[in-house]
Image (tube, helix red, strand yellow):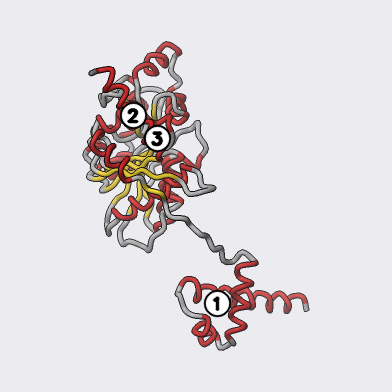
Amino acid sequence: MSEECDFVKQREIELILKAARLYYEENLSQDQVASQLNTSRSNVSRMLTTARTQGFVEIKIVAPLSRHETVAAQLKKLLGIKEVQVVSPSSNELALNAVGRAAASALISELKPNQTIAVSWGRGLEATVLHCKKDTIPGLKITQLMGALSTVETSVTADDIGRTLARNLNAAFVPFNAPVVVSNQKIRNSLLEEGQISQVLDMARHANVAIVGIGSHASASSEMVLDEFRLPEKERASIGAEYAGDIAARFYNSAGKILNTAMDSRVIGISLDELRKIPRVIGIANGTEKVLGVIGAARAKLVDSLVIDLACANSILKYLSATEAVSA
């Protein structure tokens, strides 16, 4: 008797799910759903209510992003970046989520069949890929610009970002299993000779679009990257005094000069010179702590599309205005 009850219950759930898919995914009216399922409209209404109350269907209201076109135009001119988006969150929304939504929209607008998308790491990218939803694009591939960081939670590493993005876009994910930083150049060179790693990095170099998080001097993300190198105290202090920001574990100063230090010889990933050659690079930053990183990345010509929040944008304008006044 129990098995029979379970069978009937399962059949009811399957019918409720079918009604929900027809109504919410295929946009049929309740009358059309009733006709397809050979039942009454009132019964369909009951099933749809049950689908919501049981959590089979989640309805989410997403407020439109607040975009600040005047501020974006100022930054576009001052930083020399082709495209700048400045957004602020809706009520009860974190700025990081607003930046992620805007960056996801920017990325999706770039997607075409048979493209390769390469990703770095970070919370901004995590927020972005969680908002990336699109019908399957034929031949779309996702890969990493860099190896994985060992000192951060897994959801924000390049391999996890890539895997989540591929899943959300129904794309193929092509990973390589390697750390982003190794102890010396000899180990790095040995790993780069591995066929799988060298092939994936070559794929990243020839990506159509890259999406990267921008680290900045003394920001939490940049400090995590520096932790990977396990530098002696004096050496860490020296790089700490010089760098303005980092992308994919590669560092640069506020003038846009790439810092080709001994650290570079220990990194598994594409170089910043190689990043520049990718046709479209979308950079993401959130918060006032990212000012120097964004300015340095712009001066180094590392990104041609920038998505930031209003607080970061205003802080950049304030910094540039102050430095211009000092130099005048």
Q: Residue at x 42, y 31 (%)?
A: 288
Determine whether 125 is above or below 244 in the image: below
**Amino acid type of disc 1?**
Ala
Q: Residue at x 33, y 35 (%)?
A: 269
- Of marks 3 and 1, which one's residue comes earlier in the chain? 1
Q: Residue furthest right?
A: 1
Q: Which one is in front, 69 or 213?
A: 69
x, y percent for residue 35: 52, 87
Which quadrant: the C terminus?
Answer: top left
Q: Is residue 21 left or right of residue 305?
A: right
Residue behind mark 1: 19
Q: Which one is in front, 122 or 228?
A: 122
How far apart are the alpha carbons under marks 3 and 2?
22 Å
Q: Residues within 10 Å of mark 3 (few under 14, many from 20)?
A: many
Please state which of the two labelled residues, at mark 3 or mark 1, is closer to the viewer: 3
Instruction: State which quadrant residue 84 falls in.
Output: top left
**Amino acid type of disc 2?**
Arg
**Amino acid type of disc 3?**
Cys
- Of marks 1 and 2, which one's residue comes earlier in the chain? 1
Q: Is residue 229 left or right of residue 256?
A: right
Residue behind mark 2: 250
